[in-house]
Image: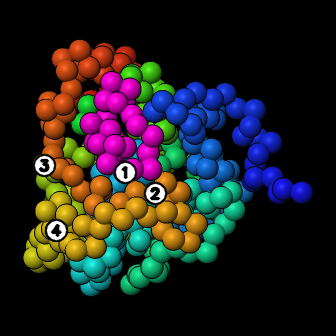
Amino acid sequence: MEESEPYEDLINPLPTVPFGGSPPPLHQYKGFWFRKQTIQGLLATHDHFVPLPTDVLLCSFQKTGTTWLKSLLFSIINRHLKDSLLSINPHFLIPSLELTMYTDGKPQSPLFIEKTSSSCRILSTHLPYQLLPPSVKDSDCKIVYITRNPKDFIVSFWHFMVSNKHHHPVSLEEAVDGICTGVLPGGPYFNHVLGYWKERLEGPSKRVFFLTYEDLKRNTAGHVRRLGEFLGCPFGVDDENEVDEIVRICSFDTMRNVEVNKDEKLLGAMGKSISLVPFSLKSLFRKGEVGDHENYLSQEMIECIDKVAKEKLSGSGLNLG
């Protein structure tokens, strides 16, 4: 008898929609859209993950600066090991809860290199705050969240989808429609952002460090210092060279030119890689520019996204450009 997949009884009845023109579909779970395997990882995370009070959780929507922030957080917390980033991709140093640690609906053996100089674990997730395990919400672990101008995000997301051959074809028009309707993997995008923004405003003091990709680009050194303070490992007044070195090693130009990050081979899951969804390391480093959407989006697309952003973010005090 064929063994049933984990959480099959919970997932199969969920509403589904196609995305990208062909299977697998997206499943709606508690207001958000995910691939089936992501929901399996989400549910397993709820059932099994027990955070430590010293944990740092890097939270983000995909393609909003996750790889860059992983390299920065690793370097800030493990300063004398920052050169590891010149030979190891940051996704191998900081695992994802639902995509690495609890893939296939059950806990996995670590698929990443355990390389740390502190008792602080750094973990990542693309889950919205609304769907984080209660164990996380009730813990003292710190959360660092990064988001991005939605127009730049959707262009980066679209390029990532088409650059990795495993993905089903997604046109730019379909991607823009996805962010405007909320129907895209992990979406709705604005609900995801607002979940962490609300927790930053209303949650326990100093629990959430919320930043935008644009602000991080504008003043990387200043945010490295602020993150050090937030994480309990501050930089002293005489540590300017240390901060500058972290900024240099973690910069887009440095990371893109590291040999390991030029790898075009698709990395799979389940003991072979760092994610449920195969992708090449090279696809993580395209441009990293602010305002790149102007090179791709039509005026009609821009107006659509701006209209939805204005409606969704109204009254929140948050402006994403």
Give the spatial CA distance, label 4 vs label 1.
19 Å
Q: Is residue 177 above or below residue 96?
A: above
Which span of residues is magenta-colored? 154-176
| In front: label 3 or label 4 | 4
The residue sitting at 46% across, 81% down in the picture is: 114
Instruction: Give amino acid for label 2.
Output: Pro
Magenta residue check for 170: yes
Determine contact: label 3, label 4, CB under 8 Å.
Answer: no
Q: Residues within 10 Å of mark 4 (few under 14, many from 20)?
A: few
**Looking at the image, which is closer to me, 300 or 118?**
300
Determine contact: label 2, label 1, CB under 8 Å.
Answer: yes
Q: Is residue 232 left or right of residue 270?
A: left
The residue sitting at 30% across, 56% down in the picture is: 284
Q: Which residue is mark 3?
A: 218
Q: Residues within 10 Å of mark 2 (few under 14, many from 20)?
A: some
Q: Residues within 10 Å of mark 1 (few under 14, many from 20)?
A: many
Question: In the rendered image, which quarter contains the C terminus?
Answer: top left
Disc on the earlier residue, 3 or 2: 3
Q: Which residue is mark 4?
A: 257
Determine contact: label 3, label 2, CB under 8 Å.
Answer: no
Q: Is residue 131 left or right of residue 169?
A: right
Residue 56, x across and y down, in percent? 45, 64
Q: Which residue is mark 2?
A: 278
Secondary structure at numbered mark 2: loop
Q: Which residue is mark 1?
A: 164
